[in-house]
Image (cartoon, rainbow, N blue to C red):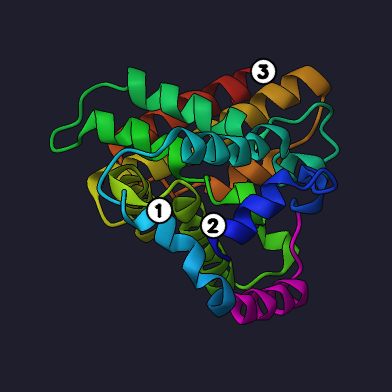
Amino acid sequence: MSRAICKSILLSPSFTSTHIRFIPFRAAASRSSKMAATESSLSSSSSSSSSSSSASPSPSSAIDFLSLCHRLKTTKRAGWIRKDVQGPESIADHMYRMGLMALIASDVPGVNREKCIKMAIVHDIAEAIVGDITPSDGVPKQEKSRMEQEALKNMCELLGGGARAKEISELWMEYEENSSLEAKVVKDFDKVEMILQALEYENEQGKDLDEFFVSTAGKFQTDLGKAWASEVASRRRKQQ
């Protein structure tokens, strides 16, 4: 999907976040083949942005990109919807608190805290296009990754390419591949934020969200993540 297609979807008044929350595997495969067929006919649309590929985004590209990211604010996290949580957090809510986690975390040897902050606020950015795909959707992990990588590519093209788009792409891939200390820390933040949110929903709405704690148990990779997860679990035990 080129910049032109991405922008046309962005500006379509009939296309809302409710259209992108769940993407069945067969529907995704069909849509991917259609996008691939259209790609060649619209390849010229990227030429206008290539001349400024080494510069910061133009005002037009920046606002297009930010308008697309609005969906992160309106798309609710699918796991909470499935559990009938009232007023569930959005994808952007989740990423924002992860950014705060990275901001307030104690220094860890060999970990660039600023990089963690950036990674936290882009790690789910592709969900602006594909939605919040969860295991219950039945999309194979490899296909989910492919869909998100394609979405990320489209978003970077919408931004006009260049240094900022490259940084977003590299941060996202580093997180996806769990290939650095920063990625491991941020992946732990992802899980900590989820169980902290689960605890808050349990307290506020009387929900039983034990499955979210079970699904993350033993999967924290860093001492920082383990310590924070232990604190959340301790508070939950005291309230039971």
Q: Residues within 10 Å of mark 2 (few under 14, many from 20)?
A: many
Please name the amino acid that badge 2 sits on.
Arg
- Image marks 1 and 2: residues in contact by CB distance under 8 Å: yes
**Viewer-side residue, 224 vs 235:** 224
- Foreground pick, 227 / 101: 101
The N terminus: image quadrant = bottom right
Are dots 3 and 1 in contact, CB under 8 Å?
Answer: no
> Which residue sits furthest left?
110
Q: Nearer the viewer, residue 39 or 136?
A: 39
Q: Is residue 164 above or below residue 37?
A: above
In the displayed structure, 84 sits above or below 25; it is above
Between 173 and 194, the one lying in front of the other is 173
Marks 1, 2: nearer the viewer:
1
Instruction: Note whether residue 189 is visible.
Output: no
Q: Which mark is residue 111?
A: none
The magenta span reads: 22-38
Question: Dot 1 corresponds to which residue?
Answer: 49
